[in-house]
Amino acid sequence: MEILQLPRNSHLAEGTASAQISGVITRAFKADTVRLDKTDAQWVITARQSAEGSQPSILLTCLLPLSLRDNGKPHTYSFDGTRKVTTASAAIFTANTTFAAVSGEITVTLRKNRIVATFNFTAQPYNQPEAQLMVSRGTCDVHNGTGKFQVDLSGEMLPTRSFKAENLAINTFEHLGIDPYYNIQGWTHVFPYTEHFFAVQIDTKVREGTYKIVLSDPRIGILTNLFAYQHLYATSGQLTIKKMPHAGHAIAYFKVEFNHPHLPVYSAKGQLNIQDYGQAPG
């Protein structure tokens, strides 16, 4: 499998986010894509609404502490320091301006990597306190997967000898002229805005079994950006699919080689066992 360009949300977790925005901009916010990340410092929710006509795109982010308990019970955080727990923050980026939350709160439940939240806040640019946005009736429901995605690597000039995903997701994508396929992916943050990932992409009609990896096979592909952040597909090797993710649970093993012109050759031996059901908290 060789898709020339990944979909924009190629490793976004599934979910929804909406709110009413008023103030210097008035707009009903309904996200096109919602992503949940877990870094070594915090949970990160990112929701994006595309531009519509003269209305600019909107990017809403919310940072939550890793101390948020995975017990399905509500926890409330303040954006203005009036409560004991104030380690949450929120911001909106639109029209080339960042509006940071200065008051308000968010109530969150976390259960099995699913976050459900309600929020309200007032935000303003750092140097323009009079230019405010009021965000009301905010809701968010987003999840990613649980399990593991691990890869051992060998070869020259590798940034690491092993890969272990911090975040996991199973998504289904359709493109014009390409049959629907599963994108089973794990990713790990390297720096605040960069990440390494591995993905196994499988045509939804493929059955469990063992398959040879070749670039000319449109049904199966193994993709990574581990080498200099270039998106590279495995050129040879083998993939064993123990469980197709039709019901949200994928199990697979692979041993492949990446051999591309003008780049070092390296091998990867990986395994994944991911559950991504989007089950309700509780």
Image (tube, rainbow, N blue to C red):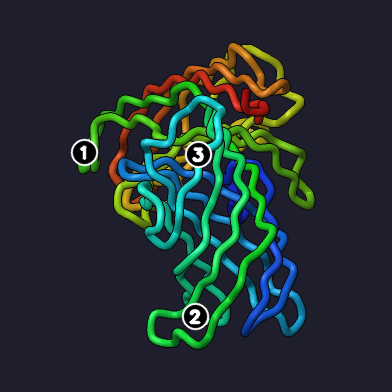
Residue located at (37% from left, 38% from top): 66
Q: CA distance from mark 1 to mark 3?
A: 47 Å
How many numbered markers are drawn?
3
Disc 3 crowd, CA 10 A, few/some/many (<14, 14-19, 20+): some
Q: Earlier along the polypeptide chain: callout 1 or callout 3?
A: 3
CA distance separating discs 3 and 2: 30 Å
Which residue is denoted by mark 2 in the rendering?
A: 97
Residue 29 drawn at (x, y percent): 70, 65
Residue 130 visible in the current orientation: yes
What element does badge 3 sit on? strand
Q: Nearer the viewer, mark 3 or mark 2?
A: 3
Location of mark 1 (residue): 156
Where is residue 229 drawn, in percent x and y?
A: 37, 52
Horizontal arrangement in the rendering, residue 249 relative to residue 104 (left or right):
right
Image position of 243 with respect to 90: above or below:
above
Residue at (54, 22) in percent of width and height: 274
Per the image, the residue denoted by label 3 is: 75
Residue 242 position (above or below residue 14) = above
Give the amino acid at mark 3. His
